[in-house]
Image (cartoon, helix red, strand yellow):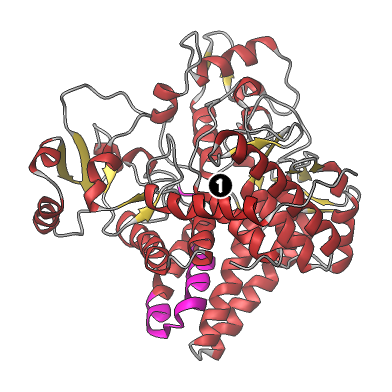
């Protein structure tokens, strides 16, 4: 196995300096409101204002006054401040959802705050001693639950109907390690519980097996996809999906549920599945069949592992706050979930954690890097961890960890690798004592990212980990094919891996 050459201090320092500067360019606050409100993912008539919606539970006139103080009159003229209607269906024109404090966006076309990106961004901010911004990042997540009902996929009105992987409790505890502010920690508990219950009651809960699924609300095509994810011929992502259904035989699921061949139309269930796949954060992959259209019928490894962590985190928080009885209740919930994960999601024969199909009662044999989540979060037994490690060669590539073992033309499949999944795999390996493997993958990923940084002078969203390249657009057939620069979670993961590698920040 080829080992990449050791990185020099000068190479590492150059990336660190770049990341430190990038936090500033990726930060959005009141003074950047016009910049934040602009959204390249939607059609926008020139010379019309960009809309910013404020929660109906807020004091709208007061916020308008605050914004007028922060912005020039020229900027304010290009904005229209509205109160968010109580029913999502009543929104006719989409806009930005107001957040009171500064936050870091991923970068590129993602010019708003994202749910699970924010966890990896937070790790980077904490490593870089950006404590004030780190605190604000967490506060904006808590604000979303209070004022918009859940952590949103992102703070745009068309995202009100879907959440993202539940990482809020991990963010709260990561910040608390730095602040040790018990009063603040106590204030987060009702919000953490509210977000937890979003996931553990129907329709997110599959009651018969006691595990949860992703489930987005809203009907029809996702607005941001319809407008912005078009190819050179002007075909939308959904046009390309229909062509795929017309051309290929599919055995993964009953295609008639998702595509009406007679009318050449995608069904309502397809669009619900499509929105739900975006809630999962893995858009797009064939993990749940082509385009993950069948995701509604699965208990995913990633989501249920994260919910186990939420239960453990609420146990830990109650322990810190001296609530022994509540701590025990949360630990008991986590133990029950661990047993259910073991029963439904662990595949002894394959030696991997796999997603569970409710209707057939079978696991889907689609090898995906989420198999490392139960190692990352301490759910696996030592024997299970060993089996996963024995399968490491399925995922290990010259540049780190492959997302899946299937080349599909989707960005969340082979040959692509992403910073968060690499960190999850590395931390999972270290947790179970597989330090040689963890260090090897760390070194491969850092070597690739830094080589490409030196070539392009930027950090990006995803990489081809087979070719060790940031040039991925030609290989992506569905969704958007660009490789966004910035990039929030790549920054955070690099700093985390460097710190773990003994190169202290």
Residue 206 seen in this snapshot? no
**Span of residues in magenta:** 163-187
Question: x, y percentage for residue 334?
Answer: 65, 71
Q: Is residue 36 above or below residue 473?
A: below
Q: Quick one: quadrant of the N terminus?
A: top right
- The chief SS type of the magenta part is helix
Q: Nearer the viewer, residue 457 or 130?
A: 457
- Kindly identify the residue that appears in the image at 10 percent across and 51 percent down: 68
Query: The residue tagged with tag 1: helix, strand or loop?
Result: loop
Q: Is residue 179 magenta?
A: yes
Q: Is residue 51 left or right of residue 274?
A: left
Question: x, y percentage for residue 437?
Answer: 84, 57
Q: Is residue 406 above or below residue 371?
A: above
Question: Which image quadrant is residue 481 in?
Answer: top right
Q: Is residue 413 left or right of residue 227?
A: right
- Kindly identify the residue that appears in the image at 21 percent across and 59 percent down: 57
Q: Going by the picture, which residue comes out furthest to the front?
A: 10
Q: Quick one: quadrant of the C terminus?
A: bottom right
Question: x, y percentage for residue 234?
Answer: 46, 11
Q: Is residue 490 left or right of residue 86?
A: right
Give the residue number, with chain letter if any, for mark 1. 214
Q: Is residue 58 above or below residue 173?
A: above
Q: Is residue 437 left or right of residue 162?
A: right
Question: Which image quadrant is residue 95 in?
Answer: top left
- Kindly identify the residue that appears in the image at 66 percent across and 57 percent down: 9
Residue 502 seen in this snapshot? yes
Q: Nearer the viewer, residue 373 or 502?
A: 502
Question: x, y percentage for residue 449?
Answer: 65, 43
């Amino acid at each position: 196995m080829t080992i990449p050459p050791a990185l020099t201090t000068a190479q590492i320092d150059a990336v660190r300096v770049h990341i430190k500067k990038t936090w500033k360019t990726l930060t959005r606050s009141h003074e950047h409101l016009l910049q934040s409100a602009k959204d390249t993912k939607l059609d926008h008539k020139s010379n019309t204002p960009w809309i910013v919606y404020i929660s109906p539970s807020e004091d709208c006139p007061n916020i308008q006054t605050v914004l007028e103080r922060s912005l020039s009159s020229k900027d304010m003229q290009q904005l229209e401040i509205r109160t968010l209607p109580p029913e999502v269906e009543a929104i006719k024109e989409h806009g930005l959802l107001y957040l009171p404090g500064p936050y870091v966006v991923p970068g590129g076309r993602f010019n708003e705050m994202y749910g699970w990106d924010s966890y990896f961004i937070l790790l980077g901010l904490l490593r870089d001693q950006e404590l004030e911004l780190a605190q604000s990042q967490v506060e904006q997540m808590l604000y979303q639950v209070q004022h918009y009902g859940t952590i949103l996929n992102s703070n745009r009105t068309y995202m009100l109907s879907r959440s993202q992987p539940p990482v809020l409790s991990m963010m709260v505890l990561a910040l608390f390690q730095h602040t040790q502010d018990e009063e603040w920690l106590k204030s987060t508990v009702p919000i953490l519980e509210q977000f937890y219950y979003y996931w553990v009651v129907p329709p997110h809960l599959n009651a018969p097996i006691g595990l949860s699924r992703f489930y987005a609300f809203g009907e029809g095509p996702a607005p941001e996809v319809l407008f912005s994810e078009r190819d050179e011929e002007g075909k939308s992502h959904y046009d390309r999906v229909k062509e795929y259904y017309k051309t290929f035989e599919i055995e993964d699921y009953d295609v008639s549920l998702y595509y009406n061949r007679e009318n050449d139309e995608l069904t309502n269930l397809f669009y619900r599945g499509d929105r739900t796949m975006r809630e999962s954060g893995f858009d797009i992959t064939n993990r749940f069949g082509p385009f993950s259209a069948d995701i509604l019928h699965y208990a995913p490894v990633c989501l249920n592992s994260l919910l186990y962590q939420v239960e453990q985190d609420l146990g830990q928080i109650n322990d810190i706050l001296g609530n022994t009885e509540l701590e025990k209740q949360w630990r008991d919930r986590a133990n029950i979930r661990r047993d259910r994960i073991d029963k439904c999601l662990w595949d002894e024969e394959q030696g991997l954690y796999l997603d569970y199909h409710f209707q057939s009662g079978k696991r889907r044999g689609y090898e995906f890097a989420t198999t490392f989540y139960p190692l990352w979060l301490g759910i696996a037994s030592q024997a299970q961890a060993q089996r996963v490690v024995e399968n490491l060669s399925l995922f290990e590539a010259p540049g780190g960890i492959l997302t899946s073992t299937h080349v599909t033309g989707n960005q969340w499949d082979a040959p692509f690798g992403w910073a968060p999944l690499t960190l999850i795999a590395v931390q999972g390996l270290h947790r179970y004592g597989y330090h040689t493997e963890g260090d090897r993958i760390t070194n491969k990923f850092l070597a690739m990212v830094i080589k490409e940084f030196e070539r392009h002078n930027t950090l990006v969203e995803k990489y081809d980990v087979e070719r060790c390249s940031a040039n991925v657009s030609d290989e992506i057939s569905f969704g958007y094919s660009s490789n966004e620069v910035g990039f929030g979670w790549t920054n955070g993961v690099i700093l985390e891996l460097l710190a773990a590698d003994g190169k202290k920040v």
